[in-house]
Image (tube, helix red, strand yellow):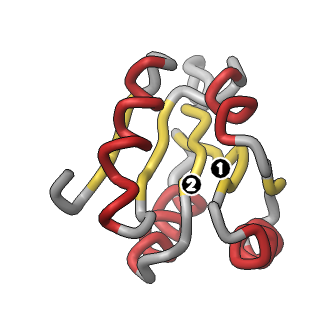
Amino acid sequence: MSLVPPIGVALLSFAHTHQEHWAKSFSADPRAVIRAVWDADARRGVAAAARHATCFEGSLDTLLRRSDIQAVTICAETCRHADLVVAAAQARKHILCEKPI
């Protein structure tokens, strides 16, 4: 039993299919918990949130202000990476972004 609470993770977009890999990895790791999904495509985000038993947050700003989220994974369209990385960094979140900015 860990005395350290799990890291709250938000999944930013399912535009790239490898976000499913991260979602499954975090779900299998007791040190992490998926707290929310955000996606510029609300339909895609709602579906992803349902698949991963979490909530969809339509507002990126609201999601990034949440104190129960410490880290984000960014799998949005590559052209959105820079803006999402900057927003997450300004919100003092840990960031996993696989592709170039």
Query: Is residue 89 positioned above or below 99 on the image?
Result: above
Q: Amino acid at mark 2?
A: Leu
**SS state under label 1:** strand
x%, y% of residue 68? 70, 25
Q: Is residue 93 above or below residue 37?
A: above
Q: Position of residue 15 (x, y in %)?
A: 49, 75
C-alpha separation, residue under disc 1 versus residue under disc 2: 7 Å
Q: Residues within 10 Å of mark 2 (few under 14, many from 20)?
A: many
The three-letter code of the residue at mark 1 reads Ile
Res. 89 mark = none
x, y percent for residue 55: 83, 54
Q: Residue at x 79, y 48 (%)?
A: 57
- Residue tagged 2: 11
Vertically, is 24 above or below 31? below
Disc 1: which residue: 34
Residue drawn at (76%, 66%) of the image = 49
- The quarter of the rendered structure image containing the N terminus is top right
Q: How many marks?
A: 2
Callouts 1 and 2 close, C-beta under 8 Å: yes
Quarter of the figure with residue 42: bottom right
Specify which label sits upstream in the sequence, 1 or 2. Answer: 2
The quarter holding residue 33 reads: top right
Left/right of residue 89 with respect to residue 50 in the rendered view: left
Closer to us: 32 or 10: 10
Q: Secondary structure at mark 2?
A: strand
In percent of width and height, residue 77 lies at 40, 69
Horizontally, residue 87 falls left or right of residue 40, namely: left
Residue that sits furthest to the bottom in the current view: 17
